[in-house]
Image (cartoon, grey):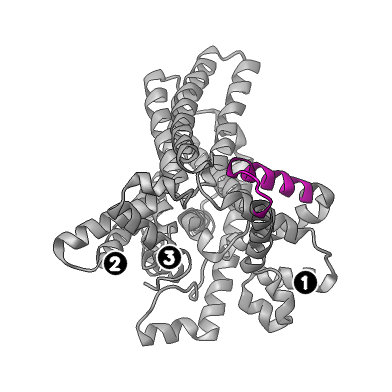
Amino acid sequence: MSIVYDAMVFEQLGKMLYHSGWIEFFKTGPHNEPVFPLLIAFSMRVADYFSISYQTVQVSLHILILLSTQLLTLFILQRLHISQGVKALIILYMGISPALVNATFSLWSEIAAYPFILGIILIGVKCWESILSSNYKKIILWGGCLAFVFIMITSIKALFEYIFIAFMALYFVLMVKSIVKKERKILIGTLLFFLTTLVLFNASLFLYKSLNQKYNGHFMLTDRGPYILYGNAAKRSEPLSLKRFSSGLAFVAGDGVCYKLFDKEDCDFWHIFTVEKYGRSKLSELENRGVPNSEIDSIMVTLAKEEISEKPFQQTLLIFVESFKMLFWESTLVGFVSYPPWLQKTFEFTPFKNGLRLLLFLITFISMVYTLRYTLRRRDQLFHYKSPQNTETHILFFILTLIMSYTGSYSLFIINTRYASPIASLYLIMIAFTIQKTMFRQKMDGE
């Protein structure tokens, strides 16, 4: 592990929780989301007990998390009736993917989100099918489980507070349909689901935010959202020449691609450090003016909205361009991990690193388009639960929804390669499904 940047922050927060406890964590906050620092604190406690390095314990935990992600992926592939050979290929690749291996051996929080992403899919489908079958006991049970999974993943990545809203919108559509079609049992089911899930999720977040407000004056989950949102909005409002826009398109494929084709100044504009500069500058300005902590966050969000409203078309275009970074999820040079010399040379070998990144982008993009087309053609099955084929459509629909809401949320801020790794398992499931339906020439129903 290379302990730099956010990894250094996570390590410090883990030490704080281990040695000083939660009160100190809240008093000196708001900090990063709490689950990953808590995991580091646990590793430090275990390491002290056995007199070993906490990183050894931490890496072992990460490997177990990756293993659990592989097992959950395998379970979903089985429910999609993927053949043994394709399942073996996908699970094997998850174990050797440079991006996933990098996340496993890094002190970054993305790894902690892996199993919860798949949990959202599995439990979300269970909630959906419980409502369709009007099984009220299961609706309450699975609704509580879905709230728990979203609480956990929001405590790892705060953006899931907004992705949760997008997910709830699906069930709202189901509720509206039940009203229009006068399906009383389904209406009761959706109301029970909302009551269970919304109360549990929002009560938990309210409690955590209230603790932050009590001890540091910020009613929020983490310290990064508002100023990063403003920094991106301000950057996207800058004059957009053809050259600058072209360099932005090249930057989507990776900063290395951009620096080979354009000047350093043009490419630096699209870097995360530029966003930090805009955001930190405005944050410092507000603090120097004596604006209370409790007001800074809302002011930053308001200023971001103003920047977006001034150039809505340009902002929308650049947000759309930003979203394509999520498809370039594979990379041999994510960084922050030291590899053996032979592996480092392999990862730096230009034809290999560029070829793998491009190949996985193309396969992922094609698979996503195929899965979207397949699901749209079977959209009527979304509101039925009578056969395994309905479950197949439900799973694909929830996967697409989570990918799109995840990508959309991050696109408002900024996307780095490592941010895409939590949904890599969903990409690989779509790839497996596409291989199964095309290469094995299984005809689509209705064709």
Name the residue at 57% across, 46% down: 400
Q: Is residue 447 left or right of residue 344?
A: right
Task: Tell me the residue that label 2 is attached to.
Answer: 55
Residue occupying image coordinates x 49% and y 53%: 426
- Magenta stretch: give its range: 288-307
Q: How many labels sit on residues?
A: 3
Q: Quadrant of residue 109?
A: bottom left
The secondary structure type at the circle numbered 3 is helix
Q: Is residue 13 above or below residue 98?
A: above
Q: Position of residue 161 (x, y in %)?
A: 53, 41
Image-based side of 162 in relation to 429, left or right: right
Cα–Cα gap, marks 2 and 3? 12 Å
Residue 80 appears in view: no
In the rendered image, the vertical position of residue 178 relative to residue 222, given as above or below: above
Frontmost residue, 309 versus 398: 309
Q: Which quarter of the figure is the N terminus placed in? A: bottom left
- 105 left or right, relative to 445: left
- Asked if residue 429 lies in the magenta stretch, the reply is no
Instruction: Characterize the local packing of mark 3: few (<14), some (14-19) or many (20 or more) Cα atoms within 10 angstroms.
Output: some
Mark 2 crowdedness (10 Å alpha carbons): few <14, some 14-19, many ≥20: some
The label on residue 7 is 3
Please name whichever residue, 416 or 346, is drawn nearer the observer in this view of the structure: 416
Q: Which residue is mark 1?
A: 246
Of the numbered discs in the image, which one, if any, rests on residue 336? none
Q: Which three-letter amino acid code belongs to the residue tagged 2?
A: Gln
Identify residue type, mark 1.
Answer: Ser
